[in-house]
Each structure stands twice: as structure tokens, then as C-alpha cells.
Image (spheres, helix red, strand yellow):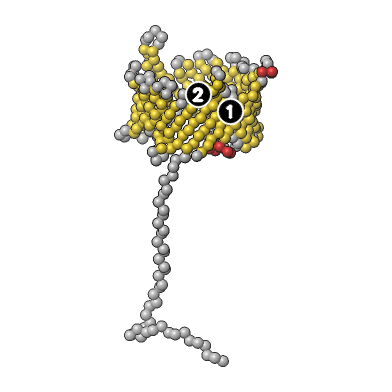
Amino acid sequence: MAAPALLPSPPMDEDGAAPPVLATPDPAPPPPEPKPPLERQRPPVRVTSEFDSERRLFSHRLSCRVLDGLAKLRLRVSHGAGGGGIAWGPPDVALLARNFSVVIDPASRGAVLRGAADLAGSLRLRASHNTKEQQGEVSVTANLGDSPCKIELSSMVPPNGLPKATFFFPKGEVSIKEKILDEGDRILSVNGLVKSHVLNGACTAVYNDNAMNIKYRYKDDEISFIPSISLPSNSLSFAFKRQLTPSDKLSYWYNFDTNYWGAIYKHKENKHLKWKAGYESDNRLGWASLWVGDAGGSTKEVPLKAKVHFTLKVPQDNVQNSVVVFHVKKRWDF
């Protein structure tokens, strides 16, 4: 039998000891490849067209990003059937940015300018001016320390009286402004809005021009109940909504003063397809509508970037005068 092969022993140093074994260092990672410079892409041009069959009106809106995306340029024009042919309405041009906008109306030969800026501390300045009417408005808003409350002072330019003061707090707001009566007398008017949670619901009280509306809203996963009363007229009404299934919902409202009522039944097949049917007693009108496309969303969130809305209106007193109206909204990106 052959003797087993022996591994060569490590070399010795001068003292006869083996030198320490050094660990092999890991190979250095390759340097990252330089990223190619970002290509400057041309801002897309978006054209949105709408048609309302009831008004027989076409409207078109063209918009694109300018100034390296800091602002948007918009052109809007409308036309419809009139007289002996197509009547074009005057277009308007707008330049819209985050803190500044200009809207030009060639028909009135005027423009509306709006701007906003943050001043020292927690102050924010907003201003608007109408070149046609030679009027504008200036307002200054300030936060009150670290609290969520803030106060705003606003005045017309040129001023026509004392500035309006508004105090905002988490549960609502209160404003004081000067009001001119028919007799020419000037008085201070106080308006306000207060919200609060009461009995597992939300209560909202709105006070405006010596009249108050109190509305209570209770809502859970299945029902909503919304009674409201107006003072001092004591006008009482309520709305009731019931979620029958995840796709079906029934709504009903009634006004005790006029005995007018209405009902709506909604069925949502999916996000982009739903239909409604309802009745309005004040107009003695029954109707049904079909939505193709997200009714509450923008055109960029719906299939084919389009929305179509058909409505059938059936007057109770004259069924023969039933009409079908539709509204179409389509978007193109270039």
C-alpha cells in the first residue's frame, strides 16, 4: 500500500516558529458606473374636450408645463350652436404657478392677478387684483404661537371700510366685518361656524346675517342620518342614507315646511361604471343616469382617459317631453 502524501509544512522564521497566516482581504467592490445625465424632456401637452348636449356647448382646454415645470400655461375656448352656425366664445389664457397666477380674459380686456408669499415668522401674505374693475384684495394670516389657532386680516383695495378679521380655531372660525345697510348705515356683522362631536356624530352650527343653521350628522358603516334646522324660521329637514350592499345605496330627504322630498338609488358596478335613479317632488321629475368613468375623479384616473354621463329625464306631468342628455369628457396627451 502506498504511503499517504504529506502536505508541505509552512516555512519557518529564524526562531523556528511558523509565521502567522494573514487573511486574504476581500476584493474591493467595483466603482459605481457614472449615471447618465438626466435628459430634459419636453413638457407634455394636454388637451381636454367636453360636450354638454343640454347646452349644446363644446369646450376645450389646452395646458402644458413651462418654466422647467414651475408653472402651467392654460388656454380655454368654447363654442356652440347659435344663430345660423357655430358661435365661438372668447378664449381665456392663464399662467398658473404655486404662488402666482395670471388669468387674461380678452372679452373684458382685463386680467385677474393673484399672488402669495411667506413673510418673516409665521405671516403669509395673499393679494389679488382685477385690472378691469380696478379692484383687489389683500390679506395677511398669522399663526398664534405654537397653537393651531390663527388670525387673518383682509381688506379691499382701494379700501371701502374697516378690514375684515377672522379667527380660526380647531373647531371652527369667527369673523367680524363691516356691513353697509340699505339706509347707508355701517354696522359690525359677526359670522361664524362651530363643529363638535355629539352622541357619536358631528354637529355643525353656521351663523350668518342673523340666521343660524344647525345640522347633525350621524354615520356608521350602514346608515347616515342628517337632521337640520334653520333659526329663526324653524325650518326643519332631514336626510337619510342606507348602504344596502357594498354596491347599492339608497338616499332620501324630506323638507317639513314645503313637503318636498326626493329619493336616489345608486348602484356601483365598479370604480368606472355606476348608475343612479331618482325622483324630485318639487320639480315632479324622475330621472336615471349612467356614468362610464370615475364620476368623482379626474380624467387621468379612468379607462381611456374619458368620462361619459347619460341622463334620462321624465317629467311626471308630461311623459312625452322626456329627454336624454349626455356629457362627454375626453383627454388627449401629446
Q: Is there any visible trace of residue 141 in the rendered image?
A: no
User: At which x and y percent is residue 145?
Assistant: 34, 33
**Residue projecting furthest to the right:** 320
**Residue projecting furthest to the bottom:** 1
**Residue projecting furthest to the top:** 183
User: Considering only vertical position in the picture, is 11 above or below 232?
Assistant: below
Disc 1 to disc 2, how far (Cα)? 19 Å
* Residue type, numbered disc 2: Trp
Residue displayed at 40% across by 11% down: 181
**Disc number at residue 327?**
1
- Total number of numbered labels? 2
- The secondary element bearing badge 2 is classed as strand
User: At which x and y percent is residue 136?
Assistant: 36, 22
Q: Is there any visible trace of residue 179 in the rendered image?
A: yes
Q: Nearer the viewer, residue 153 or 55?
A: 55
User: At which x and y percent is residue 307?
Assistant: 58, 33
Task: Quadrant for residue 65, please give it.
Answer: top left
**Disc number at residue 88?**
2
Query: Would residue 12 be found to the left or right of residue 81 on screen?
Result: left
* Residue type, numbered disc 1: His
Residue displayed at 61% across by 16% down: 282
**Disc number at residue 190?**
none
User: Considering only vertical position in the picture, is 161 above or below 296?
Assistant: above
Quadrant (top left/top right/bottom left/bottom right) for the N terminus: bottom right
- The secondary element bearing badge 1 is classed as strand
Q: Nearer the viewer, residue 80 or 142?
A: 80
Query: Would residue 47 be found to the left or right of residue 279 on screen?
Result: left
Residue displayed at 37% across by 9% down: 184
